[in-house]
Image (cartoon, helix red, strand yellow):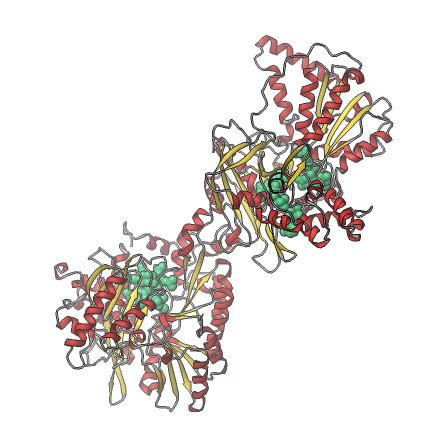
Amino acid sequence: MADRNLTEVERIKANSRHLRGTIAESLADPLTGALAEDDTQLSKFHGFYQQDDRDVRGERKRQRLEPAYSFMIRARIPAGVCTTPQWLNMDRLARHHANGTIRLTTRQAIQLHGVIKRDLKTTIAGINASMLDTLAACGDVNRNVMAPPLPALSAMHRQVRTDAERLSAHLTPATRAYHELWLDGEKLAGADAEPIYGATYLPRKFKTAFAVPPQNDVDVFAQDLGFIAITGDGRLLGYNVTVGGGMGMSHGEPATYPRLGDVLGFCEREQLLAVAEAVITTQRDFGDRTNRKHARLKYTIEDRGLDWFRGEVASRSGTRLQKARPFAFAGTGDVYGWQKSDDGRWHYTLFVQNGRVLDAGRRRLLSGLRAIADIHRGEFRLTPNQNLIISDVAAADKARIDELLQEFGIANDDHATPLRLHSLACVALPTCALAMAESERYLPSLIDRLDEELAAVGLADEAITIRMTGCPNGCARPYIAEIGLVGKGPGTYNLYLGASFAGDRLNSLYLENADEAAIVAALGSLFARFAAERQAGERFGDFVIRSGVVREIRAGRFFHGEAADA
Amino acid sequence: MSTFAAGSLALPLADDQLQRVSDAVAGLSPTQMQWVSGYIAGLGAAPSALAAAPPEPGRTLTILYGSQTGNGEAIAGALAARSRELGFATALQSLADYRQSNLRRESLAVFVVSTHGEGDPPDDAELFHEFLLSARAPRLPDLGYAVLALGDSSYANFCQTGRELDARLEELGARRLLPAVECDVDFEADAASWSDGIIGRLPEWLDVTPPAPRLRAVGAPARFGRENPFSARVLLNQKITARDSSKDVRHIELSLEGSGLTYQPGDALAVVAGNPPQLVEQLLRYLGASAGDEVLLGQETLTLSDALTQRLEITAASTGFVRAWAVASAAADLEELLGDGRQAALGDFLHGHQVIDIIRRYPARVDAQRFVSMLRKLSPRSYSIASSQRANPDEVHLTVAAVRYKAFGSEHWGATSTHIIDRVETGETLSVYVEPNSRFRLPDDDATDIIMIGPGTGVAPFRAFVEERAERGAPGRNWLFFGDRNFSSDFLYQLEWQKHLERGSLARLDVAFSRDQEHKTYVQDRIRERGADVYEWLEGGAAIYVCGDAQRMAGDVNAALVDVVAAQAKVSRDRAEQKIRELRLGGRYRRDVY
Ligand code: SRM
Ligand SMILES: Cc1cc2nc3c(=O)[nH]c(=O)nc-3n(C[C@H](O)[C@H](O)[C@H](O)COP(=O)(O)OP(=O)(O)OC[C@H]3O[C@@H](n4cnc5c(N)ncnc54)[C@H](O)[C@@H]3O)c2cc1C
Ligand SMILES: Cc1cc2nc3c(=O)[nH]c(=O)nc-3n(C[C@H](O)[C@H](O)[C@H](O)COP(=O)(O)O)c2cc1C
Ligand code: SF4
């Protein structure tokens, strides 16, 4: 690939000797808390991002000090399965080496923030010591594979989870660099090989998820590659394959847009790995490596057409996909509270506001979960919506868990309204380098005000999905929320409306650069209309379309207006 | 085996000597120049001739000084100027340059010498001091002498070096012409009257009637000085330690516009400031007196609060104060501390206790007048200049650490540091003057490599050094050792150092942050780790500079340097110490510690 105008990142990957770069030297440099420029790209493949505390950026410049560099480490947790020893280990690392909080992500993973350079190795090694790792948690590779967090719910859920884990393992990079750098693995004599990815890996990040209808908790249509479980008389027959989903866009660049995945066809369980590999190698070879903003699979498919893509996948996997099977999703998000699985065990889905596990006032999540992990014999499960499931509880132990939830003030009923329970906010400030506005630190208080508006018109019990991000990258999948708020600048957001509750329709721009007053006023009056004019069982997202408040977005490429369609 | 013969050692003249020489030949015609060079060569041929040179000893006043931070040098210089004006044959020399063998031939020598370290002589007096106190010292039957000792009575070994000199000269049979005068930090008055005493009796001592007074030596004294400080506007008062730092260190920028003040890297800026009002309050309450009460200071009457705020040292305690308070309070502990052989204990006591702590611990009823009479005059504080005037023509920068701490259950403040940091708004002014420090200069040869060791605020002069050398485009390499508590919050001037490294104006930077890991590490540990390179630099003629804490750091760093030499040159510790000492005396290892 002697393409002149390859992106800088492509050059860095190519010269990195399978992701080694000069990371070792960067770690050893005592004069700065940062890594060498190029290494900040490579570090992502190892699962960590260089960041700095943006709250003190200006102040430190005046103090003639470099930015307060620290690192966000993301642990990959396929299907979100986290044993209690693993949790306790994370809890310890968070308190000793990070900012004292654990962050549950929108992809069933765990993030630590505020880890300084000289603690990186200890922390990453510490994570690996509990049989979790951070390799490929970020970077231009397949990311953490999502799957419904409750395999225990049925035999079929269990099969899906095994498939997810098989696929995750199959798509994990083969480079030894990770072991050399973090686990003191001895240096590899010969060259590394990357059978699936090749020396320059993928053009861009790549995301995969498994969904089991009727719950679309993984937001399968937001994924590059999705597998929708198809069942016949309680058995798992295979999967409908979806491709080309993605949320990220950039303000003012119509060529970038969120897109929902297309259903490509049906494949049997046996073909799973072959099909997935074919999709990935196609993207590897045809994805746009000259422009990172146009490099995701969604654009490859838009540019070359779904039929062409289907053909590539067929020839590469040596299997024809069958016609897609019918399926139906009832909703996104998680099912809260206690659920009983077919094996008679109990599972409590705990609402974790914006995924941030910390002790705040009387709500002591970090300590509470530590206390529970200490006595709990089952596992913890991370959901695709920043929540946590205390899984596999014997009927006899339920009461004790409930006590602890009350004792630490963290039970769902304790604080959450339906709107809050259906809310997501990305991290944004102060750690995220790309944030244009607050998100995680702000959404909770905005919801207080919106709850008042809902209550005022008798909709206090109405479940509406609301998601906020600090920039248009869409980390909390805001473009498939009935109410989407996307940061534009400090204190101002674009307000999007009209996505479906089931996460299979994009929303549409309603207000630009709105501040809190404007947002509350606009939604307040819409809630009132909704209360007055809604049809039986009608969802807020459907109502705003039917009543013409916003136009329906039929496809991602129309997100900025039909004109954008060429 | 090697002695650090190379490099900047090659130049045998001290900066000031070089200055004098070049002044002397300035403006000579080529022919005149030829004659002079021949003349000097001739002098050189007869070694002892140079120092003994005319005016011949019998008729000469020889003024010798040992000075670390320049006070003594200034006093000695002023005295020399006066006696020259009056036409007396006068020789002025630093004890470092003075040829010991000449001492026997002197008939009239006066000494101005300060005390440093813990009762140690200033670096430039070290060898002479050692020689004089040794058995090698000659009998001095023909010598008449007088000693002015500079010191600080908040140190236990007050004016130690001066006292030793004075006593020893007598022992060697020399004649004490005047009783030794011991100056505290407010030395002006005492120093002046001592000088007057000498000038007054010169005709008698040299038994010459002074020829007609000569014209005043050219080069008018600086307009602003200790007696009339310049009011410098504060341009910037910027904290340079992070929020979560355990320290408050400020980068201070002052305007020198219109002052005509000039300085060189290595010089210090003296700041004349008042005391913390909170502390004055506490003292008033203690004395049961009111701000308006009048007290007498010398001839002058002023209000008690003015006296305590503007004129008197009310933070750092002095031996004199302890003595007076011991009487007032009749506290046995204090009496005991002042007894013989308790120097060390007294030193620690003085360091750990401010005036307020002593009077609270050993209560006594004294009236305001009596109390103020126990206190020293408030003296200016020195701050290493952190900027190069080349780079900042109309400004001077300082790096000031706030002295604020809790002790004996109450807040304590350093007088001047908190004045600079807390009590002067940007735009307001500070009273300052430049304290030249010819002992802490960059090598004259820009090609000489330098190793700078400056933990904490000790880094200040090195910011000036590096700025200056960058401006001058000096080819010599600059290597800095910096240390402090925490990397993330106390890396003073981190961004500037990173830039200098990029640009090459800093060749190397080694840092030690003591509190970032279990076992504490300091600059001296880094020096040992980098021993091979440090030694290689020294071999190549590099000069070493140390600035900062005198209590522990200076000694620990010195020990580390000795270790490095011993290990690298494979010589005994004694030999290594000898070499390090040679470096110091040769002017290639300079210290400015406090
Ligand atoms: C933690 C998390 C949000 C959360 O609140 O949970 C997150 C946080 C970040 N995302 Fe994300 N993304 C997270 C899920 C997502 C999702 C949702 C999903 O994957 O289902 C998306 C939208 C789907 C997609 O990929 O299109 C998403 C789209 C992005 C993008 C836009 C990518 C694009 O091609 O448009 C970026 C920026 C980029 O990649 O250039 C980004 C970049 C980032 C970075 C790493 C910022 C950066 O690149 O410097 C954020 C770190 C902030 C911080 O301080 O922690 N993140 N990010 C989620 C971690 C998931 C995980 O465990 O791996
Ligand atoms: C040549 C030279 C250069 C200098 N350069 C600098 C510089 O660049 N930057 C800088 O910040 N300072 C520098 N100093 C030190 C500076 O001159 C002052 O000594 C310092 O600022 C403290 O003065 P102050 O008036 O604030 O404190 P003072 O009013 O003098 O109070 C100091 C007294 O408080 C007591 N004390 C102080 N700290 C403690 C403690 N932790 N515990 C118990 N008792 C304590 C001691 O009794 C001490 O005598 C330099 C000094 C010299 C001689
Ligand atoms: C680091 C340091 C240590 C000192 N130690 C003593 C001491 O032990 N005894 C003393 O009487 N004065 C001591 N002094 C005070 C000096 O002697 C005093 O400031 C004197 O005016 C300096 O004169 P100079 O500039 O000629 O060296 C010390 C000063 C400094 C900066
Ligand atoms: S959406 Fe933007 S602001 Fe929020 S975490 Fe992702 S990149 Fe950061």
Q: Is residue B34 above or below residue B194?
A: above
Q: Position of residue B211 (x, y in %)?
A: 72, 10
The front one of A503 and B142 is B142
In which of the image's four quarters is ligand 3 placed?
Answer: top right
Judge by depth and name the residue closer to the eye, A516 or B313.
B313
In the rendered image, residue B209, in percent from the top left (x then y), is placed at 76, 11
- In screen coordinates, is B483 left or right of A227? right
Q: Is residue A500 left or right of residue B151?
A: left
Is residue A427 toward the left or the right of residue A233 in the image? Answer: right
Residue B81 to residue B441: above or below = above
From this view, report whether residue B411 is shown above or below residue A128: above
- Residue A510, compared with residue B108, is above or below; it is below
In the picture as drawn, the residue positioned furthest to the top comes out as B31
Name the one closer to the observer, A397 or B276.
Answer: B276
Q: Is residue B547 left or right of residue A67?
A: right
Q: Can residue B116 be seen in the rendering of this structure?
A: no
Residue A45 occupies which quadrant of the picture? bottom left
Q: Quadrant of the C terminus of chain A?
A: bottom left
Foreground of the two, B40 or A514: A514
Q: Is residue B134 visible?
A: yes
Q: Could you say where residue B508 lies in the image, as x and y percent from the top left?
A: 53, 43
Quarter of the picture holding the N terminus of chain A = bottom left
Q: Quadrant of residue B293?
A: top right
Counting the numbered discs, the total is 0
Q: Position of residue B391 (x, y in %)?
A: 47, 33
For image coordinates 50% across by 61% down, the residue present is: A119
